[in-house]
Image (cartoon, rainbow, N blue to C red):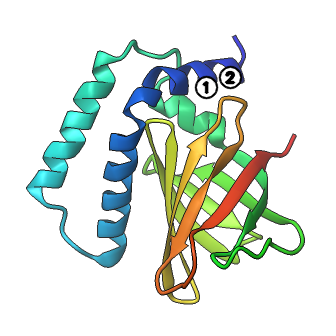
Amino acid sequence: MSMNIGLSNYFAAISQHKNAGILAASLVVAGALGGWGISATLVESAKASDSMRRDVEVAKLSLDQAKAALVGSYTVTGTDPDGVPYKGTKVVAISLAPSGALELDWDDGTFVGVGQIVDNVLAVSYAVKGRTVIALMTINPEGSLSGNWLRRTDKGSKGTETWKKKT
């Protein structure tokens, strides 16, 4: 079985718990970046999310295999929070850190971040010009990622991005 078919099965099997996972991921990322302690309530919420995930038919790929499937370089298109499309081509590289987290590197180190998979979402945190950024990228069945990002203090709606894996 190819890795893309397995990745598709993995995320299809857990997609019904997407909202709980997105909430848990955003709270964990925000708490980590803000230096706040994670409350017992959040920990219990994450445990409940894990419990719900176990109730779903186990997918073909483990979490570690899903992370490995994301490793690689992606071309990035998107919009800034004010809706203006990006100029030129951007690239994000995803690698696996010894800690098990996913490391992200935009445009040869211009920005660096850390990510974790929760259900079928890659939750990412990084900083741009001293402002915290949180991105929630849906992992699509064919291997692309798409989602929104929000940077502290920006006006306007959330920025958007689509990442397509380079072959």
Vertical position of residue 141 compared to residue 127: above or below: above
Say which quadrant the N terminus sits in. top right
**Percent position (x, y) of residue 115?**
50, 55
Residue named by callout 2: 3
* Residue depicted at 32% across the width and 77% down the height: 34
**Percent position (x, y) of residue 24?**
31, 50
Vertical position of residue 146 compared to residue 126: above or below: above
* Residue depicted at 68% across the width and 18% down the height: 5
165 with respect to 69 (left or right): right
Which of the 4 quarters of the picture holds residue 57?
top left
Dot 1 amino acid type:
Leu
Residue named by callout 1: 7
Callout 2: few (<14), some (14-19), or many (20+) C-alpha neighbours within 10 Å? some
Q: Secondary structure at mark 2?
A: helix
152 with respect to 79 (left or right): left
100 with respect to 86 (left or right): left
Give the spatial CA distance, label 1 vs label 2: 6 Å
159 with respect to 122 (left or right): right
**Percent position (x, y) of residue 2?**
72, 16
Callout 1: few (<14), some (14-19), or many (20+) C-alpha neighbours within 10 Å? many
Residue sitting farthest toward the left = 40
Q: Are marks 1 and 2 in contact (CB under 8 Å)?
A: yes
Dot 2 amino acid type:
Met
**In front of the other: 75 or 15:** 15
Q: Secondary structure at mark 1?
A: helix
